[in-house]
C-alpha cells in the first residue's frame, strides 16, 4: 500500500502529540521526585506538595495524559477517515 | 473434554482441602481457617464456572490466543489491571509505605509511569500489526523464521524469570497467610492455573483477571472507607494523624538510628513523608527505574493483551481503563499503607514478614475488630483469598504468553513453516501450556527458600534490553531489519543476564561466612573514630564496576563502642536467666528471647556449613564486579545500539520496502485480522 499525503499528515500529528505528552509525563515524574524536599515546603490540600505528588498527584496526571491521548487520537482517526468500525 | 475438565476441577478442590490438614502456622488463626477456605472455595468455584463457559467457546487458534478478538475495551482494561496488579504491587507496595513512608510510593509511581510508554509508543501499533505474539510483530518486515525463533527464546526467558519469582513469592505468601505447606501451595496454584489456561485459553484467562481485579478494587475500597471514616474523609486531618502517630514516629526513629536522637517527635513524623528511609543509592535506583519503565512495554504477557481487542480504538480505551483502575488503586494505597502503619504499627507488620507484605491483611483484620473477632477474620480471609486469586491470575497470563511463543512461533511458525490446521494449532497451544505449567511448578518447588526478588528485576531488565529495542525499532525505524533484530535481542538479553551474574544479587560465600561469624561471635569493642571526609571517586565507570575507587560519602565521628555479644554468648546468658527466673510471665518472655536467638544462631551455623570451603560465587567471583543490582542502565542502551549496528551491517531491501505498508498499517489497523507472517 503506498503512503498517501494524508497518511503522512496524520502520522506527523500523532507523533507531535505523543512527544508533547511524553514531555508532560517526564515533568510529572523526574523533577517532582528529584526536588521533593524543596516541594515539601509548599502545601497542597493540607499535604506537603512533594509528598502529595508521589502519593497521588503524579498518578492522577498520568491518567489524564492517557485519557487526553485517546480522545485526541479518536478525533484524528475520524478526521482522516481511518477509524475502524 | 468436559469430563476431563470436571475431574481436574475436583482434584484441585480436593488438593486445596487437603491443604487445611497440613496447615501449620499462618496469619489466620486455626479456628478461623474454615472461613478462609470457604472464601477460597467460592472464588475458585466462580472462576471454574467461567472456565467451563470459556472452554465451550474456545475452538479456533484466534479464540485460544486472542479470545476471538471479542474482548471489549473496558473488559480488556480490567484484565490488564488484573495482569498488572500482581501480589508484589498489591501487598508489597502497601507494606513498603507502612514501613518506609515516602519511598514506598516510588514503586507505585514507577509501575504506573511505565504504562504511559506502553500506550503512547507500543500498544496501538502492536495491536494493528501483530496477530498473537511478539514474534508476529517482528516477522512483519523481517525474515519470519529467524526473528520468530529469537523472539520466542526471549519471550520464554522473560516469562520463566518472572514466573519463577511469582511462583516462589506466591508459595511463601500463601504459607504466611494461612499456613498451607509451601509445596502444596505451589502445586495448587499450578494446577488451578493450568485448568484455566488449557481449557479456557485467553478467554478464561481474561475473565479470571477481570474477576480478580474487581475483587481487589472492592477489598481496597472497603478498607479505605473504614480507615478514612473516623477523620470525616478529610485529607489534612488524616495526614496530621499519621504524622502525629507515636508508632510511626518510633519507626522513623528506628530507621534513622543515631541521627534521630536530636529530632523532636513532630520532626520524626514529618520525616516519614520525605525520601531516603529505604532507598539509598541513586544510580541503582535510576537503573532499576529504567528497567521497570521500559521493560513493561516489552513484557510479552502485557503485549499479548492488546491482541484481544477488536479495534485500535478499543486498544486505546482499554489502556484508559487500565490506567484508571491501576492509578485509582495506587491512590488508595496511601490510605492502606499509612493506615496500617498507624493502626497496626510497623513493628508488628515487620515481625510477621520483614518485607511488609502483611500490612494489608493485618489492617483488614484490625478494621474488622481484631484477631479474635469473627468479622476481623472474615476480612482477613477475604484479603487472603484476593491475594491467592492474584497469584493464580498473573501466573496464568504468563504461562499463556510463554506457551504461545512455544506453540505459535516455534512449532507452527518455524518447525511447520506456518502450515498447520487450526485444530493442530490449538492442540499445540494446549500441549505447550501444560509443558510450561509443569515446568513452572517444578522450578517453583526447586527454588524453595531462594531469594527470588532479583528475578523480577532481571525479567524486566531482559524485556527492556531485548524485546523493547527490537519491537520499537521495527515499528519506528525504516532501516531496521533481521540482522539488527537478532543482534539486538541476543546482545540485550545476554548482557542483562551476564551483568546480573556478576552483580551483588548473587551469593558471595566470603561475605556470607563473615556475616555468620559476626552473628555467632559478636562485634569486638571498637575505639572512637574521627570523622571521615567524603572521598571523590575516579569517574563514573567506577560507580558501576569494581575496577577503581568509588566515591564515598562523609562519615560522622564515632564514639568508642563496647563489644557486642554474639549469639553463642547470648545463648549462655539467656539460658542462665531462664533457669534463674521464677515468675511464669518472666520465664515465658525469656524463653521467647531464647528461641529468637537460637533461630538466628542456627541460621548462621547453617550458612557456615553450607558455604564451608567455598570462596567464590557461581561464576567464580569473590566479590561483585558489577556494582549495581539492576543491569538496565547498561544493557538497555546496548540493546538499542546492537539493533542499530546490526541493521546497518546486514542490509535488507525487503525490510525497507515493507516499511510503507507497515507505516500505513501501524496507524490504521486495516487488515489486522488478516495479518499473518509474510
Image: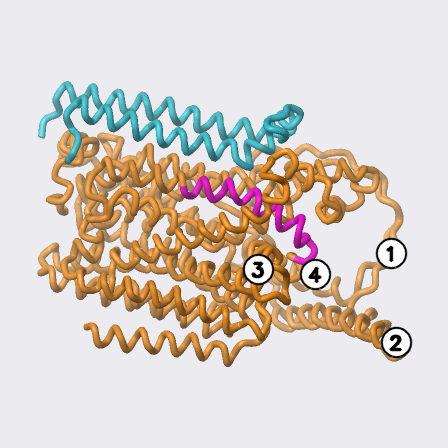
Residue for badge 3? B507
What's the distance in space between the residues labelled 4 and 3, CA to CA? 12 Å
Horizontally, residue B673 falls left or right of residue A35, namely left
Q: In this structure image, what is the colour of chain B?
A: orange
Residue for badge 1? B525
Horizontally, residue B250 falls left or right of residue A60, namely right
Q: In terms of secondary structure, where does tag 1 sit?
A: loop
Confirm whether the magenta stretch covers residue A55: no
Q: In terms of secondary structure, where does tag 2 sit?
A: loop
User: Which of the 4 image quadrants contains residue B164?
Assistant: bottom left
Chain ID of residue with mark 2:
B
Placement of A76 over or under B19, stated as above or below: above
Residue B287 x, y percent position in the rendering: 50, 40
Dots 4 and 1 on the same chain: yes
User: Which of the 4 image quadrants contains residue B156?
Assistant: bottom left
Q: Nearer the N terminus, badge 3 or badge 2?
A: 3
Placement of B198 over or under B324, stated as above or below: below
Placement of B598 over or under B347, stated as above or below: below
What's the distance in space between the residues labelled 1 and 2, CA to CA? 34 Å
Q: In terms of secondary structure, where does tag 3 sit?
A: loop
Q: Residues within 10 Å of mark 1 (few under 14, many from 20)?
A: few
Q: Quadrant of the C terminus of chain A?
A: top left
Residue for badge 4? B515
First to last magenta residue range = B325-348
The dot on residue B548 is none
Amino acid at each position: 500500500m503506498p503512503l498517501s499525503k494524508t497518511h503522512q499528515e496524520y502520522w506527523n500529528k500523532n507523533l507531535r502529540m505523543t512527544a508533547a505528552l511524553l514531555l508532560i509525563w517526564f515533568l510529572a515524574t523526574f523533577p517532582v521526585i528529584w526536588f521533593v524536599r524543596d516541594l515539601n515546603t509548599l502545601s497542597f490540600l493540607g499535604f506537603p506538595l512533594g509528598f502529595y505528588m508521589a502519593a497521588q498527584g503524579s498518578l492522577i496526571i498520568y491518567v489524564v495524559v492517557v485519557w487526553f491521548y485517546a480522545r485526541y487520537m479518536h478525533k484524528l482517526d475520524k478526521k482522516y477517515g481511518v477509524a475502524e468500525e | 473434554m468436559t469430563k476431563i475438565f470436571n475431574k481436574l476441577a475436583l482434584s484441585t478442590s480436593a488438593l486445596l482441602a487437603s491443604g487445611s490438614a497440613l496447615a501449620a502456622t499462618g496469619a489466620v488463626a486455626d479456628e478461623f481457617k474454615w472461613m478462609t477456605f470457604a472464601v477460597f472455595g467460592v472464588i475458585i468455584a466462580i472462576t471454574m464456572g467461567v472456565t467451563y463457559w470459556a472452554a465451550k467457546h474456545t475452538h479456533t487458534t484466534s479464540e485460544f490466543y486472542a479470545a476471538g478478538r471479542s474482548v471489549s475495551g473496558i473488559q480488556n482494561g480490567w484484565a490488564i489491571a488484573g495482569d498488572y496488579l500482581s501480589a508484589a504491587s498489591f501487598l508489597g507496595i502497601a507494606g513498603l509505605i507502612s514501613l518506609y513512608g515516602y519511598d514506598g510510593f516510588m514503586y507505585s509511581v514507577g509501575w504506573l509511569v511505565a504504562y504511559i510508554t506502553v500506550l503512547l509508543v507500543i500498544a496501538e501499533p502492536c495491536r494493528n500489526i501483530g496477530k498473537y505474539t511478539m514474534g508476529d510483530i517482528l516477522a512483519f518486515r523481517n525474515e519470519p523464521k529467524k526473528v520468530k525463533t529469537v523472539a520466542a527464546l526471549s519471550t520464554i526467558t522473560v516469562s520463566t524469570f518472572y514466573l519463577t519469582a511469582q511462583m516462589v513469592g506466591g508459595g511463601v505468601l500463601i504459607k504466611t497467610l494461612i499456613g498451607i505447606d509451601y509445596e502444596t501451595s505451589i502445586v495448587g496454584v499450578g494446577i488451578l492455573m493450568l485448568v484455566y489456561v488449557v481449557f479456557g485459553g485467553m478467554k478464561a484467562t481474561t475473565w479470571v483477571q477481570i474477576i480478580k481485579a474487581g475483587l481487589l478494587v472492592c477489598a481496597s475500597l472497603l478498607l479505605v472507607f473504614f480507615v478514612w471514616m473516623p477523620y470525616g474523609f478529610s485529607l489534612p486531618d488524616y495526614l496530621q494523624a499519621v504524622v502525629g502517630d507515636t508508632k510511626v514516629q518510633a519507626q522513623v526513629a528506628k530507621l534513622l538510628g543515631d541521627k534521630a536522637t536530636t529530632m523532636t517527635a513532630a520532626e520524626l513524623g514529618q520525616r516519614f513523608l520525605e525520601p531516603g528511609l529505604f532507598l539509598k543509592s541513586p544510580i541503582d535506583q535510576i537503573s532499576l527505574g529504567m528497567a521497570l519503565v521500559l521493560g513493561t512495554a516489552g513484557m510479552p504477557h502485557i503485549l499479548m493483551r492488546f491482541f484481544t481487542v477488536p479495534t485500535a480504538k478499543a486498544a486505546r480505551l482499554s489502556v484508559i481503563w487500565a490506567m484508571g483502575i491501576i492509578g485509582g488503586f495506587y491512590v488508595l494505597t496511601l490510605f492502606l499503607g499509612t493506615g496500617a502503619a498507624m493502626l497496626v504499627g510497623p513493628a508488628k507488620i515487620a515481625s510477621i514478614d520483614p518485607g511488609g507484605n502483611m500490612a494489608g491483611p493485618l489492617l483488614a483484620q484490625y478494621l474488622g475488630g481484631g484477631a479474635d473477632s469473627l468479622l476481623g477474620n472474615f476480612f482477613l480471609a477475604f484479603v487472603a483469598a484476593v491475594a491467592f486469586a492474584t497469584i493464580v491470575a498473573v501466573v496464568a497470563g504468563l504461562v499463556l504468553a510463554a506457551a504461545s511463543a512455544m506453540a505459535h512461533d516455534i512449532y507452527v511458525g518455524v518447525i511447520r513453516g506456518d502450515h498447520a490446521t487450526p485444530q493442530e494449532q490449538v492442540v499445540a497451544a494446549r500441549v505447550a501450556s501444560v509443558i510450561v505449567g509443569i515446568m513452572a511448578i517444578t522450578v517453583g518447588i526447586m527454588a524453595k527458600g531462594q531469594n527470588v526478588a532479583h528475578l523480577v528485576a532481571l525479567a524486566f531488565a531482559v524485556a527492556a534490553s531485548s524485546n523493547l529495542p527490537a519491537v520499537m525499532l521495527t515499528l519506528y525505524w525504516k532501516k531496521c531489519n533481521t540482522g539488527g533484530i537478532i543482534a539486538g535481542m541476543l546482545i540485550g538479553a545476554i548482557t542483562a543476564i551476564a551483568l546480573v551474574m556478576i552483580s551483588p544479587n548473587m551469593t558471595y560465600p566470603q561475605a556470607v561466612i563473615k556475616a555468620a561469624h559476626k552473628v555467632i561471635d559478636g562485634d569486638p569493642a571498637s575505639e572512637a573514630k574521627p570523622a571521615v571526609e567524603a572521598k571523590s571517586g575516579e569517574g563514573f565507570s567506577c560507580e558501576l564496576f569494581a575496577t577503581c575507587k568509588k566515591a564515598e560519602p562523609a562519615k560522622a565521628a564515632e564514639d568508642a563502642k563496647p563489644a557486642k555479644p554474639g549469639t553463642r554468648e547470648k545463648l549462655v546468658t539467656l539460658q542462665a536467666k531462664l533457669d534463674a527466673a521464677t515468675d511464669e510471665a518472666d520465664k515465658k518472655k525469656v524463653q521467647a528471647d531464647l528461641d529468637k536467638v537460637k533461630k538466628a544462631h542456627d541460621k548462621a551455623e547453617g550458612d557456615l556449613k553450607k558455604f564451608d570451603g567455598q570462596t567464590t560465587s557461581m561464576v567464580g567471583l569473590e566479590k561483585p564486579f558489577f556494582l549495581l543490582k539492576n543491569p538496565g542502565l547498561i544493557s538497555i542502551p546496548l540493546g538499542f545500539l546492537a539493533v542499530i549496528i546490526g541493521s546497518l551491517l546486514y542490509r535488507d531491501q525487503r525490510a525497507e520496502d515493507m516499511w510503507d505498508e507497515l507505516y500505513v498499517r501501524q496507524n490504521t489497523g486495516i487488515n489486522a485480522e488478516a495479518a499473518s507472517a509474510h
